[in-house]
Amino acid sequence: MTNNDPTTQVAETDRLAAIRPDDDDEKQLYEELKVEAPKPPQRLTLVPPVEYDGKKYNELVFDYDSMIGKDFHRIERTFYRTYKAERNEVVLPEMRHLYHNLVAADVADVPVGLILKLPRRYYVVVRNEAVKACGSSPEEEKA
């Protein structure tokens, strides 16, 4: 049975349009991930130079964009071997100074002891950059 009534044809066309995805609808199925633009390595000039283990360090270069996922896993394993948790303590590495120090030392290719020996004015800046490299911000950590 065919219905030639124009109102029925319009209603059916509207119904089909509602269930058939347009090209615009397909684009809305996915949200594009936001990825930060690549950053050049960061250099920190140490005045006066910091001595650690018999070697003087005049500058440190931090290349966070050179890291890959495997680096974060390796650093996390090092963290768990190094960090001494309190009894019944749930440890989240990303919330600990030691983890950020390990990340910073890794990208600067220096011993973590050097990062620990940095004066406050350098240490705070280095740690904050490591926190950002781990995907959070120092403001989030304070909350």
Image: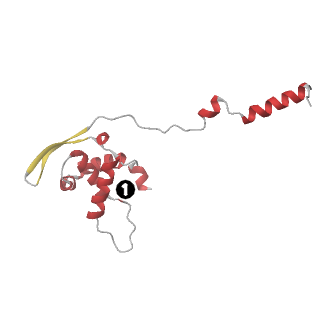
Q: Quadrant of residue 81?
A: bottom left
**Where does label 1 land, which residue?**
94
Q: Which residue occupies the foreground of this view, 56 or 74?
A: 74
Q: Residue at x 47, y 38 (%)?
A: 34
Q: Residue at x 39, y 73 (%)?
A: 88
Neighbours of disc 1 within 10 Å: few (<14), some (14-19), many (20+): some
Q: Is residue 1 above or below residue 94?
A: above
Query: Residue 58: where, in percent of width, then height?
Result: 13, 43
Q: Residue at x 35, y 49 (%)?
A: 131
Q: Residue at x 28, y 47 (%)?
A: 125
Judge from the rendering whether residue 16 lies leftward or rightward of residue 91; answer left or right: right
The local secondary structure at tag 1 comes to helix
Residue found at the very far bottom of the displayed protein: 87
Q: Quadrant of residue 89?
A: bottom left
Query: Residue 109: where, in percent of width, then height?
Result: 20, 47
Q: Is residue 115 visible?
A: yes
Q: Is residue 97 visible?
A: no
Tell me which colouring the rendered structure shows: secondary structure
Q: Which residue occupies the foreground of this view, 7 or 98?
A: 7
Q: Amino acid at mark 1?
A: Glu
